[in-house]
Image (cartoon, rainbow, N blue to C red):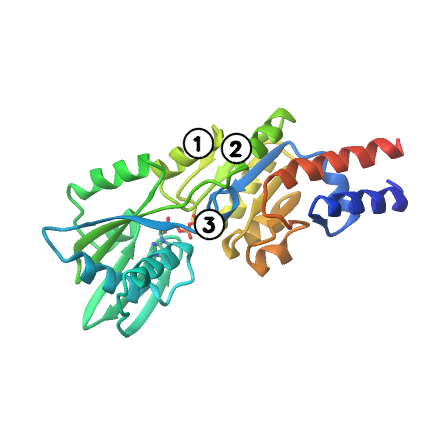
């Protein structure tokens, strides 16, 4: 494309809230055959809320939430913010925390009030030898409702199951349909568990997804599709997504996401809406048409 037509295209996209970093990204957008979408904060709002607290044999719900929220005060994960917020709403005071440690893609651990606390997914509990018994079934039920269940253990014993819900953005379903109508293969990618991922993908109208993907594995999924011959677009908002955004043929960052994601991407969707993807592709196609 001529520098002039690229400038016009970049300007048109900017009017739609789509910031294109360079002419190359504008031109390659029209060639995308597969689009990988991160789940949390990309397809969903990314501000989960606590919906369920199921304690083990009569343990006090307030006490459990106090311990869990104290532990999560050291984490910046959206799930952690949901738990901290839930405690605040109930005027529960946080306790002091020592030995905080985040286990990427699995959960968090720390010592609070002399107790060893562990909070995270099924894999984390299994790795640490925490018995889950019939709570696995309860977690499955919550996941089928598109909620994310997290297990909370005190001194190596399960204390509660805490679930959060993160609704799909209002326009994600329509924006995803636009991509599919353009003949693009849409794939969802998440670190969340398989059952929750399946429920969210179904709601979003996506029939292909990768779940339980560790942060360091996200870019490998981009490569897998590239090796299948796809020209891959990747859309994400998190620090976790940065390597995958850089690996993709075209990386798209959610404008309300982290700075690291924005810096790693070629294109930023300033409005946070996934409609920006089909908009960018349409501008790209129009730009290439004008120069032929
Ligand atoms: P995503 O790709 O959805 O952002 P992550 O890779 O960050 O997911 O996390 C994967 C899973 O690990 C979460 O669904 C959750 O079960 C668990 N997890 C991660 N961080 C935390 C945390 N701070 N508190 C509780 N659970 C966590
Ligand atoms: Mg995310």
Residue at label 3? 46
Specify the quadrant of the image occupied by residue 203.
Answer: top left
As drawn, is 56 to the left or to the right of 139?
A: left
The answer to whether marks 2 and 1 mark residues whose Cβ atoms lie closer than 8 Å is: yes
- Which quarter of the image is occupied by the N terminus? top right
Comparing 204 with 123, the one in front is 204
| Residue at image location 65% in from the left, 41% down from the top | 276
User: Alpha-carbon neighbours of circle 1 within 10 Å: few (<14), some, or many (≥20)?
Assistant: some
Name the element at disc 3.
loop
- Which quarter of the image is occupied by the C terminus? top right
Name the element at disc 1.
helix
| Residue at image location 83% in from the left, 31% down from the top | 289
x%, y% of residue 86? 32, 57
The answer to whether marks 1 and 3 mark residues whose Cβ atoms lie closer than 8 Å is: no
Residue at label 1? 203
| Residue at image location 49% in from the left, 29% down from the top | 205
Q: CA distance from mark 2 to mark 3?
A: 16 Å
User: Alpha-carbon neighbours of circle 3 within 10 Å: few (<14), some, or many (≥20)?
Assistant: many
Comparing 236 with 218, the one in front is 236
Can you tell me whether the CB of the residue at mark 3 lies under 8 Å from the nearest atom of ligand 2? yes
Number of the label disc, if any, that sits on residue 173: 2
x%, y% of residue 112? 23, 70
Name the element at disc 2.
helix
Q: CA distance from mark 1 to mark 3?
A: 16 Å
As drawn, is 125 to the left or to the right of 7?
A: left
**Compared with residue 156, is residue 193 higher up or lower down, i.e. above or below?**
above
x%, y% of residue 18? 69, 46
């Amino acid at each position: 494309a001529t520098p002039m037509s690229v400038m016009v295209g970049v300007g048109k996209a900017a009017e739609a809230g789509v910031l294109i970093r360079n002419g190359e990204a504008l031109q390659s957008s029209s060639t995308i055959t597969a689009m990988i979408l991160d789940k949390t904060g990309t397809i969903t709002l990314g501000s989960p809320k606590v919906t369920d607290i199921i304690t083990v044999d009569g343990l006090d719900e307030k006490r459990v939430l106090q311990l869990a929220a104290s532990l999560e005060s050291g984490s910046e994960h959206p799930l952690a913010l949901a738990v901290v917020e839930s405690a605040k709403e109930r005027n529960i005071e946080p306790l002091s925390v020592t030995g905080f440690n985040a286990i990427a893609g699995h959960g968090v651990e720390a010592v609070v009030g002399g107790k060893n606390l562990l909070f995270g997914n099924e894999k984390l509990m299994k790795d640490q030898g925490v018995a889950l018994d019939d709570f696995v079934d309860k977690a499955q039920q919550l996941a089928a409702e598109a909620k994310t269940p997290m297990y909370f253990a005190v001194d190596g014993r399960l204390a509660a199951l805490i679930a959060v819900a993160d609704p799909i953005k209002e326009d994600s379903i329509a924006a995803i349909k636009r991509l599919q109508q353009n003949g693009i293969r849409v794939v969802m990618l998440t670190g969340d568990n398989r059952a929750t991922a399946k429920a969210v993908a179904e709601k979003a109208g996506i029939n292909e997804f990768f779940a339980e993907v560790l942060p360091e594995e996200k870019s490998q999924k981009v490569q897998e599709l590239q090796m299948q011959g796809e020209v891959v677009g990747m859309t994400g908002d998190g620090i976790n997504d940065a390597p995958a955004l850089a690996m993709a043929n075209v990386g798209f960052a959610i404008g309300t996401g982290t700075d690291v994601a924005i810096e790693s991407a070629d294109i930023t969707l300033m409005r946070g809406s996934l409609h920006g993807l089909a908009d960018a592709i349409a501008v790209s196609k129009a730009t290439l048409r004008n120069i032929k």
